[in-house]
Amino acid sequence: MQKSSIKDLLTKKNILLLIGLLLLVLFFYLLERHITVEFIKPIILSFGIFTPIAFISLTALTTVVAFVAAPTFWVAGMWIFGEKWGLIYVYIGNYLGHIINFLLVRRWGEPIIRKIGGDKTIKKTKALLKILNLKNFTIIRFLGGPPTDPLSLAAGLTKITIPQYVIISLFGFIPNTILTYYFIYFLTFERYTLMTVVVTSITIVDYAASILYPLYAFHKMKKDVN
């Protein structure tokens, strides 16, 4: 990193924001050790008419704080808001959380990735970064699956613009969120049904594709170079 970049990072405003983020990470780490659906529901409902906003905000933060179990919040949303509105609020929260991750990395670069997710996340991010042009970003975003979180972080290190990221993610998260949501929904509420088998099968295929496509793109890139 260049000296000017380091100097920019060490401004008073940035230091305070980083301290705030670290405190937030610590809070969620301690909270996660006691998180259950039964624990979450009364907390979210305590916000009254602002319950949807509270749920969306917490769902977004589970994306930023990598070790918090997002599915637990999703199930809580299903119980509180029902199937339809639970899906809508989960989508909004998930979408906003990934925008936050992208903007954090765009602002502070690789160091913030290590703060958020540790060395393991850094490795995943760097692996995706090798193949991350606009085309591959779009395809991987629509596929979703395991690369979803590191993809948002890696995109922050590329030349992908904020409008491009926001628009592609707006549509790209729709199929993945619906699929993951109903995978969790059927396993939670309708475990022994034909739809559970169908949704689970589609989810497995999608997850496999989301892992295999980056490998294919990397192989193709090496082949083109040679």
Image: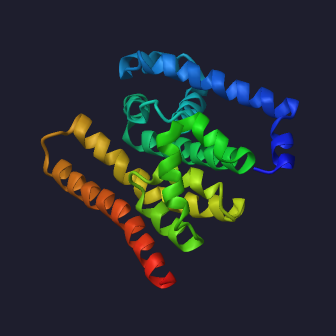
Residue in view at x 24 percent, y 53 percent: 199
Residue 9: name its quadrant.
top right
Instruction: State the image coordinates of residue 119 (x, y, percent, origin top left).
Output: 51, 40
Residue 80: name its quadrant.
top left
Instruction: State the image coordinates of residue 23 (x, y, percent, origin top left).
Output: 64, 21
Q: Is residue 132 left or right of residue 182?
A: right
Q: Nearer the viewer, residue 150 or 69?
A: 150
Residue in view at x 49 percent, y 61 percent: 141
The colour style of the image is: rainbow
Q: Nearer the viewer, residue 67 or 8?
A: 8
Residue in view at x 60 percent, y 42 percent: 113
157 is higher (above) or lower (below) than 109: below
The number of numbered badges drawn on the structure is 0
**Does the rendering let one see residue 11?**
yes
Residue in view at x 54 percent, y 33 percent: 65
Instruction: State the image coordinates of residue 62 (x, y, percent, origin top left).
Output: 51, 34
Q: Is residue 204 left or right of residue 1?
A: left
Q: Is residue 193 left or right of residue 45?
A: left
177 is higher (above) or lower (below) than 13: below
**Does the rendering let one see residue 60?**
no
